[in-house]
Amino acid sequence: MTLRDDLQPVIDDARQLVEDLGLRPYTVTVRKTIWSGAEPGLGTATYEDLELEPAPKVREPTAHHVFAAPGRYEKGDLLVSRISRDYTEAQLKGSSGSDEVCWVIDQGDSSQVYRVVGQPEKCNFEWRVHLRAMTRKRGS
């Protein structure tokens, strides 16, 4: 085990404290649709929801992000960071051709469905994910 692995529970506890203080008033859920057929849309669908705990940080890309990577970001995109490294890339993005994964960001009075753009980025103590809206907000 590395020092980073030893520190991960401490960091996750600190992130949970931020959530407990009400500073992250939303729920982030990774919703996986698993199709019984060989590809998405074929066969019977089953759903698995994974609520990310502690709640990660959700924000719009800053001007720095937008100007550093022209054409990468669209209006309405979100950056989700401070996702615990206890999750795997397969949990965040899906693992096979018959899986579909979307992210639901629920702010209580409204929710929005997103898809992952590119690959989740694995950093020292976190995952970072770039999301793009799939549908219009409900409840607004």
Image: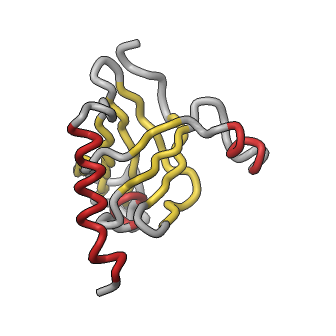
Decide which of 89, 14 is in the foreground and name it.
Answer: 14
Image side of residue 61 versus residue 98, left or right: right
Quarter holding the C terminus is top left
Side (left or right) of 116 relative to 49: right
Q: Is residue 2 visible?
A: yes
Residue found at x 44% / y 39% = 58
Using the image as rendered, state which of residue 16 and residue 136 is in the foreground. 16
- Up the image or down, 101 lies above or below 6; here it is above
Q: Position of residue 106 (x, y in %)?
A: 32, 30
Indicate left or right for 74 with 21 as reference.
right
| Residue 41, position as x, y percentages in the image | 39, 49
Q: Is residue 132 left or right of residue 70?
A: left
> How many numbered marks does the figure carry?
0
| Observer-nearest of 48 and 122 | 122
Among the 4 quarters of the image, the one containing residue 18: top left
As drawn, which residue projects farthest toward the bottom? 1
Residue 6 position, x and y percent, is: 27, 76
Q: Is the residue 23 above or below the residue 54 in the image?
A: above
User: What residue is rendered at 37% in x and 35% in y?
Assistant: 105
Residue 45 appears in the rendering: no
Query: Residue 21's spot in the image, x, y percent?
Result: 24, 34
Instruction: Give the residue displayed 33% in from the left and 48% down from the top.
Output: 30
Q: What's the colour scheme?
A: secondary structure
| Residue furthest top in the image | 140
Give the quarter of the figure containing the N terminus.
bottom left
